[in-house]
Amino acid sequence: MRILVAEQLAAEGLEVLGERHTVDERIGLSRDEYLAILPEYDALMVRSQVQVDADMIAAATRLVVIGRAGVGVDNVDLDAATRAGITVVNAPTGNTIAAAEHTLALLYALARHVPAAEASLRRGEWKRSQFTGVELRGKTLGLVGFGKIGQAVAARARAMEMPLLVADPFVTAEQAALHDAELVALDELLARADVVSLHVPKTRGTAGMIGAGELARMKPTAFLLNVARGGVVDESALADALAGGTIAGAAVDVFSTEPPVGSPLLSAPHAVLTPHLGASTVEAQVRVAVEAAQQVVDVLEGRPARYAVNAPLLAPETARALAPYLPLAHAMGSFLAQYARGGIDTLSVEVAGELAANDTSQIAAAALQGMLEEATAERVNLVNAATIARARGIAVTEMRTADAGAYATLVTLRAGTGERSARIGGTIEAGQPRIVRIDEYRLDMEPAAAILVTRHHDRPGMVGRIGALLGEADVNISAMTLARSAPRADALMLLALDEAVPDAVAAAIRGMDSILDVWVLHLPSAGA
């Protein structure tokens, strides 16, 4: 496959991409030039400067994955990518140490007036008294956001003997306590901390989260650090707070617009500014390039990405446990869509047994993928299946239960089509996918690419008559299963076939005595 690298990437990352795929480095092109060439590529690699907006995504008709060599993905339109079924991956761990160390470098520079003192000395001055700093030992550090980088800063701050406060809605008090930190609300953190350090992504909820009101709650002796994302801090409000003495100082590495031409911070006093250097170490550039590249290759080759930002994030052990069930659920969803015969408006996905202890959202996505592929020409995959289902008015429910009866794990799909419903159950046995239930019928059969399903009165000779018609058309039967509600009542027969059933043969079977219904199904592979 073809991979477009649109920004500078470490050689180690390029090597990972180029082992089995074609890599084109096209750096510094104009927007129109990128729009013109994107239809030729299956994957796109960027850092932070190229803006992958909805128009670029619409132009990239072959694109399967976008790799961001770094943490933030605010330069990628995630909604547009998700609707298009494009996986977006980032590298959230590669620059953790670099960002944490740069945060502390800025803190020390601020506390000891390093940039101003150095500039003064170069001017030939010797004004030691003007640059009296403060010690950090004993000062309270407030961390807004407690992900990997926040935790790395906390580990180093403990060695600096700084008490720790944490404000993060996704962290429990117990989790914070494991890092010797106290979990508090943001307002309390702002009021108590001597240093406030931001470690949050830029989202609708965090954009402008530190404004004039928040700065006014801080101590007049406090410092503010932002090595997170531009736009999280109101730059005009911060410049005013520095000029008015509302806070003692600020260190900023990221800006709302980069380069920050015209930013009021450029002329603000008591500010240390750096040009987005948080991840700029030799080691970090190699790590983020390799981490993002490996995931791009995984997606291109059909494997789940470890850090897909617009798909469920699964632990490696969970991904391994789910892996055999994804193609099974995909095939079951396709089976159900063809078997139900009608506009499906509800889908229930139940996972029972051992697998129920895991996050099974990808199983639901795989089932939706198989179901929707029968009803739309849109590209459907694990990334956008739920989005397409919502757009079509399909209500999806997911359930997990410990009781799977005789099975280690049982996946059951129930589809509603107005007044009627259809059900299919499947499992993995000895590493092989099995369909074990259709409606009220219990059976055992491996999914096949071509399946003939008949519902008929249970009469002697029915199996032979259907087999004879297929034989005359040179359609080979590879497997058969027969289930019935009671002797001489209704029966459901599934025939796995090596060839597709000709229309004329299907019509002849429908016309046979005792035949109640016939389905000719075509399924995606469910091989584990």
Image (spheres, rainbow, N blue to C red):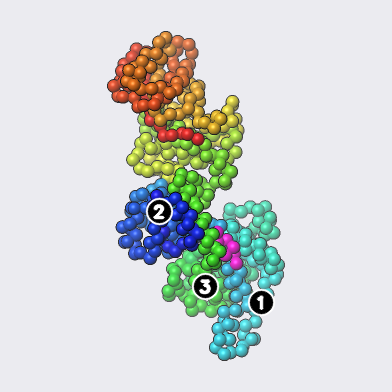
Q: Say the numbered circle drawn on residue 134.
A: 1
| Residue pictured at 45% horizontal, 72% vertical | 260
Asked whether the beta carbons under mark 2 and mark 3 sit within 8 Å of each other, the answer is no
Q: For the point 37% across and 13% down, which residue is it?
A: 465
Q: Is residue 279 left or right of residue 177?
A: left
Query: At 58% from the left edge and 28% from the top edge, which residue is drawn?
Result: 407
Q: Could you tell me if the residues under marks 1 and 2 are in contact, i.e. CB atoms within 8 Å?
A: no
Q: Which residue corresponds to mark 3?
A: 274
From the top left corner, tell me how far across and down residue 489 is, in percent. Answer: 45, 12
CA distance for labels 1 and 2: 54 Å
Choose between 25 and 264: the one closer to the eye. Answer: 25
Q: Position of residue 497 (x, y in %)?
A: 40, 25
Q: Earlier in the sequence, mark 2 or mark 3?
A: 2
Using the rendered image of the protein, determine whether residue 521 is visible from the camera's viewpoint. yes
Q: Nearer the viewer, residue 164 or 287?
A: 287
Q: Position of residue 502 (x, y in %)?
A: 31, 24
Task: Residue at 38%, 37% (x, y): give it.
Answer: 373
First along the sequence among labels 1 and 3: 1
Q: Name the residue beneath numbered marker 2.
A: 22
Residue type pointed to by label 1:
Val
Q: CA distance from mark 2 to mark 3?
A: 36 Å
Magenta segment boundaries in residue numbering: 94-101
The question of residue 95 being in magenta is answered with: yes
433 left or right of 38 in image? right
Instruction: Give the amino acid at mark 2.
Output: Thr
Q: Main secondary structure of the magenta part?
A: helix
Query: Helix or strand or loop: what does disc 2 sit on?
Result: strand
